[in-house]
Amino acid sequence: MTDTVTQGVAQRRELIAFRIGDQEFCVDIMSVREIRGWAPATPLPRTPSFVKGVINLRGAVLPIIDLGARLGLNTSEPTARHVIMVVHIGERTIGLLVDAVSDIINMSDDLVQPTPDVASDQVKTFVKGLFALDGRMVSLIALDRVLPETEAEAA
Amino acid sequence: MADVSFNDWKISRKLAAGFALMVMVIMATGGITFYNLGQLTAARGQLTDSKLALDTLGRAEFFLARQENSFRGFLISLDPYYLERAKSHQDNFKKTMSEVRTLVAGHPESVVQIDAAVKAADEWYAQVVDGGSALAMNPLTYSDAATMVGQSGLADELMTKVEGPMEAVLKVETADVAAATERLATINNQTTAMIAAALAIAAAVAAILGWMLTKMIATPINSMTSAMRRLAEGDSSVEVPARGRKDEVGEMAEAVQVFKDAAIEKARLESQTDEQRRQTEAERARNEAERAATAQEQAKVVAGLASGLDHLARGDLTFRISEPFPGDYVKLRDDFNAAISQLQEAMSVVAINVRAMRSGAGEISQAADDLSRRTEQQAASLEETAAALDEITATVRKSAEGAKQASAVVATSRGDAEKTGHVVGDAVQAMSEIEKSSEQITQIIGVIDEIAFQTNLLALNAGVEAARAGDAGRGFAVVASEVRALAQRSADAAKEIKSLISASSQQVAQGVGLVGETGKALERIVSQVAEIDGLVSEIAASAQEQATGLHQVNTAVNEMDRVTQQNAAMVEETTAASHSLATEAESLSQSVGRFNIGATGEAPAAPASRPAPARSSRGESFANRHVPQMKNSSRDGGAARRPEPVAESEGWEEF
């Protein structure tokens, strides 16, 4: 994934923009497998607080991660209007719980601005860059950081 | 003494005593007769008993003879039948003898005789019948039996023993019969003699009583009648008989004595009257002479009085009779002079009074004129008042009608307000319906929103697939983007509708609240309108009452108007009367002025200014009495205020 970001300067790419609380984030559309409405998840014992549980996706077990909680934002109890984005991270497929999917954005990589230095290191680990788009500020999420290192390594 | 006391009895008592004596005599006679009748009855009873004893004894002898007879029949025929007969005859004999024994029980010796006879008869029967029959049945001894009943036989001897005692009894009873007959005759004679004696005594007593009553009642009454007749004929010297008696005749005699005394008194009075009449005749003759002497004196007196009366007739009240009158008539002259003086004084007073009356009549006249004028003014004012009242009445009536109309309008308003209340209720209902519809719309919109959401997701997925397809999915991505845009618009529209609907629901709720308040306000309006209705009704009623009251006031004012008109007419009459009174007072003053009443009467126009010294006090008193009266009258009513100064000035002029 990092390879794709650092490749051609003027490469155009499509992003899926979504919203958690008042903030807007986006991910590369190629990593998204499916977008579906919220269905209640089955909780798993001894999991971190941001893991909501697992759901049955056409016979496969899909873990659900509350992205807001993972990013350290205030979250609320999910409703029918919440959305699960099924994404590939490495070889794993997981569901990310977000408030809403707002847009599919076409843009080129040169519009990505780096994350400012004022932010802490942890922020920099999750946000790869920022788009200033039509008065909005959209953060590009680094999906490979969403899962903890141990799991990622395990994966 | 007995005679006097008997005479003192009342006549009724005397008659009752006489008849009582007669009744006693008759009762004594009857008693003796009853006693003798009892004696006769007893003697006849004894006689009957003795005769019955004799008869029974005869029957016993008959049965004895039949025994003998039957036995002789047996001897002849030797038929036992005769023995039976003899036996039955013996029984009958015994029965009869026992009856005789009972009847002669009063004579013990006769009872002994009877017992002896029965015993002898039994012996005869035993020896003769029983013994004889036994002998006769035997033909050998038949001759003994025949001998036994033959001459100087045993039978006769025995029979004699029977017949002896029976003869003795017969003798005793015969003697009894004779004695009873004798006694009966004796009692009969005695009774006859006693009744005759009693009748004689009764006749004698009746005759004596008749003679005594005649002597004690009829004789005095006859003599009284003759005395009364003589008294009636005028003979008062007659002596009234039987005055000492104390019965009715005595009372009658006392009454006649009163008549007699009255007659004597009357005769004495008549003689006295005759004496008096003669004395009167003598006195009258004496008076005739005296009267002739006084006639001359009277002629002189009459002439003097005539001249005095002549002056009086001409109105000269100053004249006095001065010539001397005879002794008896001096008082007449003085009285005449005094009377003229009194008349003069009285006329002076009358003249003063007439003057005062004339001025008073003038004042009354003026006052009446004023009163008349003011009464006319009052009448005019009253008429105006009546007209004004009529106008007010009409106005009040109009007000009443207006109030009634207002009441009707208010009632209509009330009805309308009530209807509006219903309309408000309907509106609230409709609004709640709208709320329901809004809820349904909200649900539908939820569905639409859901569909939009799902469509959006589908479009996103389609976009993701198109992106994966690379350049081949480029067109598909455009379509997906369009679909997403549509879904987004649908969601936006649904959101908008949702907000609109929620706003509409809020407004509807607000509207419901407002309409509810409107309903409450309308209810208040209804109640207030009802109050207004009541008030307007009261106003109408008061207006009606006012109209009624005003009508009464109007009637009263009309009545006052009528009365005032009558008063005006009466005041006019009073004015005329007061004018005529003034005229009359003037003429009265002139009439009084004709009298010559000396110094005070010469100037009738102002006599009070110069009152005679002797009468000054009286004149002043009159004047004083007048002026205050005028002042009083002037003070009493405003109508007479104008004459006041005139009266006062006159009064002060007089003084």
Image: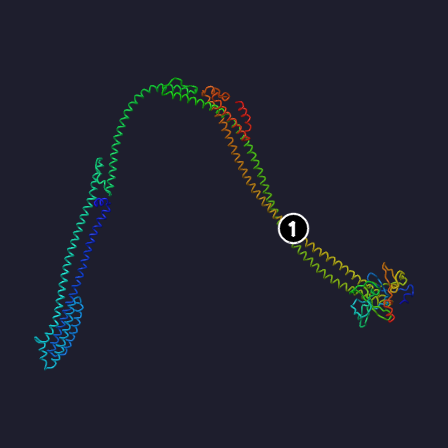
* Whole-percent x, y for residue B260 in the image: 24, 36
The reply, left or right, for residue A83 in relation to residue B178 is: right
Coloured how? rainbow
Q: Quadrant of residue B455?
A: bottom right
The reply, left or right, for residue B638 in relation to residue B309 is: right
Residue type at the position of mark 1: Ile
Q: Residue furthest left?
A: B151
Would you place residue B218 above or below residue B453 in this image? above
Regarding residue B461, the answer to whether it shows in the image is no
* Whole-percent x, y for residue B368 in the image: 52, 29
Regarding residue B516, the answer to whether it shows in the image is yes
Question: Mark 1 packing: few (<14 Cα in 10 Å), some, or many (20+)?
Answer: some
* Whole-percent x, y for residue B654 in the image: 52, 22
Q: Residue at x 46, y 19 (%)?
A: B598
Q: Nearer the viewer, residue B410 or A38?
A: A38
Q: Nearer the viewer, residue B240 or A94?
A: B240
Q: Residue at x 22, y 40 (%)?
A: B242
Residue marked by disc 1: B525
Q: Nearer the viewer, residue B381 or B157?
A: B157
Which chain does the residue under circle 1 lie in?
Answer: B
